[in-house]
Image (spheres, rainbow, N blue to C red):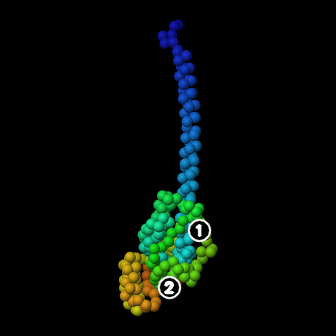
Amino acid sequence: MQRLFPEKSGHNNLNQANYFNMKKSLKFFLLPLIAFLSVIAACNKDNTASVDETIDEVLYNVQERGGMGRYGCYELVFPVTIQLPDSSTAEVNSYEELKQTLRNYFQNNGTGNHHGHRPNINFVYPISVVNEDGEIISVANQDELLELRRACAGTFGNHGPGGHGNHGLSCFEIVFPITIEFPDGTTAEATDRQSLHQLIREWRQNNPGVQGRPKMVFPITVKMTDDGSLVTVNSREELRELKENCE
């Protein structure tokens, strides 16, 4: 029987050959592209790790410098202004904001300098810290910060910078409002961190030469950074015990 539509075997063979040639060409093109994308992904992963490691080192160094945070004897009172490696400044209201500020900076500027060393940050002074007795200590410069560290170095020698940013940079946060008592026996209420700084600054300006430190009036409430629970602290002894058991 004669076929009405005879097979065009030559045409089909040509299409099949074109298909395999196209597939081979596509494979030849895709392999370098996949390899390139893999390299980019690996570089991004390495860069992320480098940024995280640099943040850990910077946070560890800035806390160890003054014996502050979970492994130290003092808690930093926010907000603070920091000076970044390029001499620009930023105000931060918490360690989380500080970490994010550092992350943004290192992602945009890299994690090293022309000497191959890790960059560092500095505080814009004055700053305030709270010691284990509830005293609010004003720190005017880097030398005074180092004096605090010499008075109480903490346990930084038992820890390294690896993962420091995720270990919990502070034991607790002070819950406002709080009442502070000045060395002359007068008191004032600080409604937030900014007003605390302002009250202390104004008192210093109005009472030059008066010795002693402002201190918190107990009881106070603190928010634990580990679980967010609120704890009432009734005395400086309880505050000291809380800080000592924090690590």
* Residue under the point 56% across and 58% down: 49
**Cα gap from disc 2 to disc 1, whole angstroms:** 27 Å
Residue 102 appears in the rendering: yes
Q: Of callouts 2 and 1, which one flags the residue occurring earlier in the amino acid sequence?
A: 2
User: Can you identify the residue that label 2 sits on?
Assistant: 133
Classed neighbour count for the residue bearing mark 1: other residues with Cα under 10 Å, few (<14), some (14–19), many (≥20) = some
Pick out the residue farthest to the right: 158
User: Can you identify the residue that label 1 sits on?
Assistant: 161
Query: Is residue 19 depicted above or below 216 in this figure?
Result: above
Q: Amino acid at mark 2?
A: Asp
Q: Amino acid at mark 1?
A: Pro
* Residue under the point 56% across and 44% down: 36
Toward the viewer: 190 or 61? Answer: 61
Q: Position of residue 134 (x, y in %)?
A: 47, 84
Query: Is residue 221 depicted above or below 10 in this figure?
Result: below
Q: Secondary structure at mark 1?
A: loop
Q: Position of residue 165 (x, y in %)?
A: 53, 67
Query: Is residue 117 depicted above or below 31 in this figure?
Result: below
Query: Is residue 46 depicted above or below 215 in this figure?
Result: above
Q: Secondary structure at mark 2?
A: loop
